[in-house]
Image (cartoon, coloured by chain):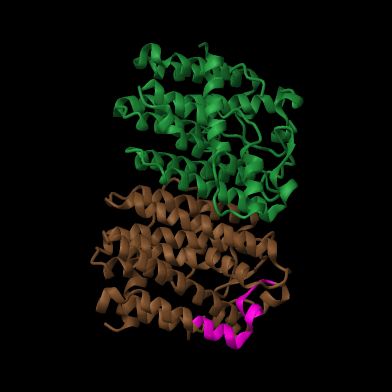
Chain colours: A brown, B green
Amino acid sequence: MNMNEQLNTYKQQVEEALEGLPFAGVPDALRDAMRYSLLSGGKRLRGCLLLAACEMAGGDAKAALPFAAAVEMIHAYSLIHDDLPAMDNDTMRRGKPTNHVVYGEALAILAGDGLLTHAFSVMAASAHPKAFEALGEIAGAAASMLNGQTLDVTMAGTEPNMDLVRDIHQGKTAAMLTAPVTAGLILAGASAAQIEAGRRYGYHLGMAFQIVDDLLDIEGDPDLMGKTLGKDEEEGKLTWPACVGVDWARQDAADHIRHAVGALSAFGERAAFLQQLAQATLTREQ
Amino acid sequence: MNMNEQLNTYKQQVEEALEGLPFAGVPDALRDAMRYSLLSGGKRLRGCLLLAACEMAGGDAKAALPFAAAVEMIHAYSLIHDDLPAMDNDTMRRGKPTNHVVYGEALAILAGDGLLTHAFSVMAASAHPKAFEALGEIAGAAASMLNGQTLDVTMAGTEPNMDLVRDIHQGKTAAMLTAPVTAGLILAGASAAQIEAGRRYGYHLGMAFQIVDDLLDIEGDPDLMGKTLGKDEEEGKLTWPACVGVDWARQDAADHIRHAVGALSAFGERAAFLQQLAQATLTREQ
């Protein structure tokens, strides 16, 4: 299988795991709002990273599926809450109206809370021997996301500053791209050195991913992106291109990917998929 | 020690555990908003229940403290989000302005998300041999709370109906009074039968607690309650007194407490504290 075929296989596994979540006992209104955002497409990058990292270290991807579902649920919750009127006030995402536009603010808040809560329930229901450790890794990343989002919301409009932007990107984006990798490795029973290599990979992948996101907000295709572009500059958001310019930002993203690829060298051939996935981040158009 | 002295001892232990939470790496704005609601007083009933249930079954309350802190963090998160303008739109709680009044809606949403997330981080950082099982119990209750809150928000204004009100009370209130008891018992290594007894106690305590809450909204002292009263009727909230009237509601609360007390009979003398605590619920004024 080439990289794209493998990615589609992982993506389909994640999609099926998400579609199969029972949400037992959840009132219809809340379940509908949760599923609207959870099953609205998306790349499933976080879930795929978790399955791929698990297999890279010789683990069983099937046993890791509840954790792949959990990281996607946490990602979906964060998008619902970030889109709220009091936060980024976004009305479109992935070419569809955002959650609060469809269900109203009260249900959107509850749907986000619900996806975050059920992510932990799903992990807690796993009988995997490494479940508790993997859950801790993912909980830490969920906390980091809030740190990044807080800085993003509260520091908008201030002078761009590389250290601050790095902190925002690390929290908002890199943490929840790193945790799937390290959790996947933990579930596979990887060594501490392997987990640290995965942590470096995830960090650099995440930084590159967010820089490319910032670049796409400047020069992307709104139809492919499925959302309004140009909002970062309009709202004075602290982005990497705002710090160093578009050309340097593009170069910095490429440097991060070089580091991400290098971090996995000890895994040899087994790292090919995650290395190619990182490379593909640089040329993504959505 | 009599019941009130014991309750104060537990409460102080919970308070110290909450004050000592480091929230490492959390930006000041978010930490301030989280601590504002988390450390704003309150009865600490959930944390105290967890410590007391643990000790009732011969467990070590000190080792259970992270879980007592976690249930209080989850309670605080739920109050912050319930008070939001899009939800109950409450401006006062415990005699102080609510979180969103002080910090704005964006930070209030993030502070709620943060307390929920850190509750799981704190439990995941515990080395307690029963940590994973206790965490699962608490995660399930956090999910039930959202079910109850969803019904509370979406069904307001409809005809009062005992089954529906029971579902709302079970989700909104009883679940997060039951989980501290069952989690405390789990942490103490209690038997399945003991845990089931704790579940019955928590259910009846929770139902009584919410009925009394509904009664206080009708006939309580606003100064003692520290919030605006009479809102339930104004907003068409589905309450137990709205179903059966004030007199029957008072009687039903007493019946639930009788069942709660009876549920713990197998614990003998060791159940005295939790039984007296349940009795005191009936005469509380705040």
Using residue A22 as the reference point, say whether residue A93 is left or right of it: right
Indicate the quadrant where residue B12 lies.
top right
The magenta segment is A237-253
Q: Position of residue A16 (x, y in %)?
A: 35, 65
Indicate the quadrant where residue B57 lies.
top left
* Location of residue B57 with respect to A9 vertically, above or below: above
Residue found at x 48% / y 27%? B49
Residue found at x 67% / y 65%? A89
* Location of residue B27 with respect to A169 vertically, above or below: above
* In the image, farthest residue toward the bottom: A247
Residue found at x 50% / y 14%? B276
Residue in front for this viewpoint, A79 or B7:
B7
Q: Position of residue A142 (x, y in %)?
A: 49, 56
Q: Position of residue A101 (x, y in %)?
A: 64, 63
Q: Is residue A40 visible?
A: yes
Residue in front for this viewpoint, A270 or B211:
A270
Residue in front for this viewpoint, B190 or A41:
B190
Using residue B258 as the reference point, say whether residue A217 is left or right of it: right
